[in-house]
Image (cartoon, rainbow, N blue to C red):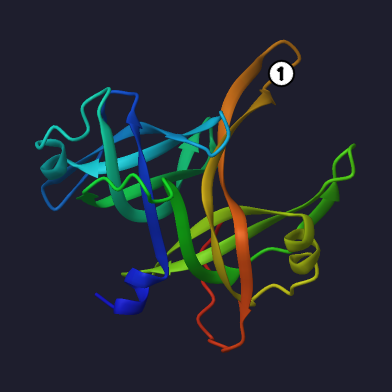
């Protein structure tokens, strides 16, 4: 596998397993399962991060409910058809289980990808600046992951005018947040969104003509 494609999307998480496993998919006879890890923030809050793990790693017992586990992997996306509409699903694909380090940041993402939609800049009622980005990160076998990111303050001002196609280097954390989805006049559903909260972002000046072109609608 191309070394650059291994290095352009890296996740480290440490947290408590808070859900049992559900079957996700099977590839070449290897089964994969979904579960959720609760990761503490530096504040008193926490993020509930979806994780996909091979049955080969599950057999160790490291992902039993209630256990604290440290993992490395990649933040990935795929499209899932729900009610006739395509929905972007995000998950951390686990590559390995690590020794737990009490000094390490429990939630860190580093990636290099391409801005694939125009940034959406706004301010909150309290005057806080926010900018939403969608970044395409190349993966092996001509696949790409489309990862929503959010920048704050001076980072929001920095990214709001970046043109589509620019290559970006991003460091941050995976955050979860609940929101209300109005399905009809009487039916409102609570859902969870996932995104990368940006701590550091830079433009990679090297121009590369391999911006992903998959359908992300």
Would you say residue 208 is visible in this rendering?
Answer: yes
Report the residue marked by disc 1: 184
Q: Position of residue 177 (x, y in %)?
A: 60, 33
- Name above or below for residue 144 compared with residue 68: below
Residue nearer the viewer, 133 or 44: 44
Residue nearer the viewer, 100 or 69: 100
Residue nearer the viewer, 200 or 101: 101
Tell me what residue is drawn at x 29 percent, y 78 percent: 2
Mark 1 lies on a secondary structure that is loop
Q: Is residue 124 left or right of residue 197?
A: right
Q: Is residue 150 left or right of residue 26?
A: right
Q: Is residue 107 left or right of residue 133?
A: left
- Name above or below for residue 129 compared with residue 55: below
Tell me what residue is drawn at x 47 percent, y 34 percent: 40
Q: Position of residue 175 (x, y in %)?
A: 55, 41
* Image-quadrant location for residue 168: bottom right
Would you say residue 23 is visible in this rendering?
Answer: no
Residue nearer the viewer, 151 or 70: 70
* Image-quadrant location for residue 206: bottom right
């Amino acid at each position: 596998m191309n070394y650059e494609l291994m290095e352009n999307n890296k996740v480290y998480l440490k947290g408590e397993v808070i859900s049992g496993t559900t079957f996700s998919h099977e590839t070449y006879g290897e089964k994969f399962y979904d579960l959720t890890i609760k990761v503490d923030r530096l504040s008193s809050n926490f993020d509930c991060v979806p994780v996909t793990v091979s049955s080969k790693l599950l057999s160790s017992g490291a992902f039993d409910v209630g256990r604290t586990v440290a993992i490395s992997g990649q933040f990935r996306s795929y499209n899932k058809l729900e009610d006739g509409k395509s929905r972007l699903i995000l998950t951390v694909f686990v590559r390995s289980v690590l020794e737990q380090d009490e000094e390490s940041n429990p939630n860190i993402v580093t990636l290099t990808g391409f801005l694939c939609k125009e940034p959406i800049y706004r301010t909150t009622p309290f005057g806080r600046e926010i900018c939403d980005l969608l970044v395409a990160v190349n993966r092996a076998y001509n696949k790409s992951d489309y990862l929503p990111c959010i920048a704050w303050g001076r980072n929001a001002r920095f990214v709001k005018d970046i043109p589509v196609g620019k290559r970006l280097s991003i460091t941050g954390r995976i955050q979860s947040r609940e929101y209300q989805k109005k399905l009809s006049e009487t039916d409102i559903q609570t859902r969870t969104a996932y995104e990368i909260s940006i701590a550091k972002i830079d433009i990679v000046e090297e121009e590369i003509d391999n911006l992903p072109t998959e359908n992300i609608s």
